[in-house]
Image: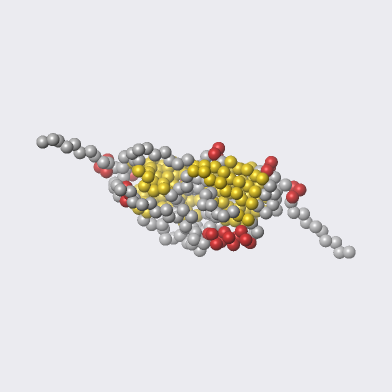
């Protein structure tokens, strides 16, 4: 049922011309995600290397889950950049659930740069087995 | 039914300009990087006293990381275990890289492996790679004769 989880927006604010190494606050990164559905919950794993735990924001509004976090890595003093593949900016990603989720009981842990979200399905969304009575 | 997964954005799509910029930068600094793997992403800073190499290794515990230095090459090895799935679970999306990874960077100078250090914080490993004293550039005074 949850195959209908969709990524809606990738925040059009992403400025592709911005150098990732520059102190450009509008650089938006889309974190890679794994989504695993269980009977009563959905586990989401997102790579947020360098994300500041204080800046992490997880919001479920109706069926839209928004994850944002800031990354600000101080460059080392006395060195010049030679090869840059990642930089400072904001991680942002949105997901839409196809069914009602329990926003009150979302569990979020950020460990070693990976955000693990456990989003329980709302009671009315859980599959029910219908007993068929033989007539 | 599970819809076919779109293997999108594996290559850090937000910055479309990256590979080109990277190639330009590497050429500019005379660096020899091996063909770019997608994991882990690396930043390299250099200076007269050595280099600092940072790599994004989210979800890899520091104990799982193996760093080896040989001459002017530094290799980062490790593995990231996949999420254990049970019978009843359905993987809806899998974009994150799993399994073993390895990446080697060749610097324009040799490193002092004994004085090298590594620090792991929030999924980013930062290596401090000093240059041996004997290998540092020396300024030659020019005397008018």
Furthest toward the top, the residue is: A134
- Residue B116 lies, in percent from the top left, at 66, 43
Q: Residue at x 57, y 48 (%)?
A: B103
Q: Is residue A128 left or right of residue B130?
A: left
- Residue A118 lies, in percent from the top left, at 38, 41
- Residue A15 lies, in percent from the top left, at 47, 61
Q: Residue at x 45, y 51 (%)?
A: A31
Most foreground residue, A75 or B81: B81
Q: Is residue B64 left or right of residue A11?
A: right
Note whether B27 is above or below B59 in the view shown: below
Which quarter of the figure is the C terminus of chain B placed in? bottom right
Q: Residue at x 38, y 57 (%)?
A: A9
- Residue B36 lies, in percent from the top left, at 55, 54
**Does any portion of residue B127 appear in the rendered image?**
yes
Q: Residue at x 57, y 55 (%)?
A: B35
Q: Is residue A91 left or right of residue B36?
A: left
Most foreground residue, A24 or B97: B97
Q: Is residue B4 left or right of residue A15?
A: left
Furthest toward the right, the residue is: B145
Furthest toward the left, the residue is: A135
Model colouring: secondary structure
**Does any portion of residue A53 appear in the rendered image?**
no
């Amino acid at each position: 049922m949850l195959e209908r989880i969709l990524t809606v927006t990738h925040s059009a604010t992403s400025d592709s011309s911005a150098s990732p190494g520059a102190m450009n606050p509008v650089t938006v990164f889309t974190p890679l995600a794994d989504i695993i559905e269980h009977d009563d919950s959905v586990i989401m794993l997102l790579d947020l290397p360098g994300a500041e735990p204080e800046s992490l924001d997880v919001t479920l509004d109706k069926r839209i889950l928004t994850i944002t976090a800031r990354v600000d890595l101080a460059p080392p003093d006395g060195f010049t950049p030679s090869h840059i593949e990642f930089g400072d900016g904001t991680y942002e990603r949105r997901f839409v659930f196809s069914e009602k989720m329990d926003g009150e009981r979302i569990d979020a842990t950020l460990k070693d740069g990976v955000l693990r979200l456990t989003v329980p399905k709302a009671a009315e969304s859980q599959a029910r087995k219908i007993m068929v009575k033989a007539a | 039914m599970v819809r076919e997964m779109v293997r999108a954005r594996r290559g850090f799509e937000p910055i479309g300009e990256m590979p080109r910029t990277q190639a330009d930068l590497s050429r500019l600094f005379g660096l020899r990087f091996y063909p770019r793997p997608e994991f882990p992403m690396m930043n390299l800073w250099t200076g007269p006293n050595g280099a600092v190499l940072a790599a994004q290794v989210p979800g890899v515990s520091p104990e799982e990381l193996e760093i080896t230095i040989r001459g002017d090459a530094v290799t980062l090895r490790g593995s990231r275990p996949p999420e254990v799935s049970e019978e009843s679970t359905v993987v809806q999306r899998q974009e994150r890289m799993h399994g073993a990874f390895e990446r080697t960077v060749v610097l324009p100078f040799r490193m002092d492996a004994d004085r090298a250090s590594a620090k792991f914080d929030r999924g980013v490993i930062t290596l401090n790679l000093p240059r041996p004293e004997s290998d540092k550039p020396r300024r030659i005074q020019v005397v008018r004769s």
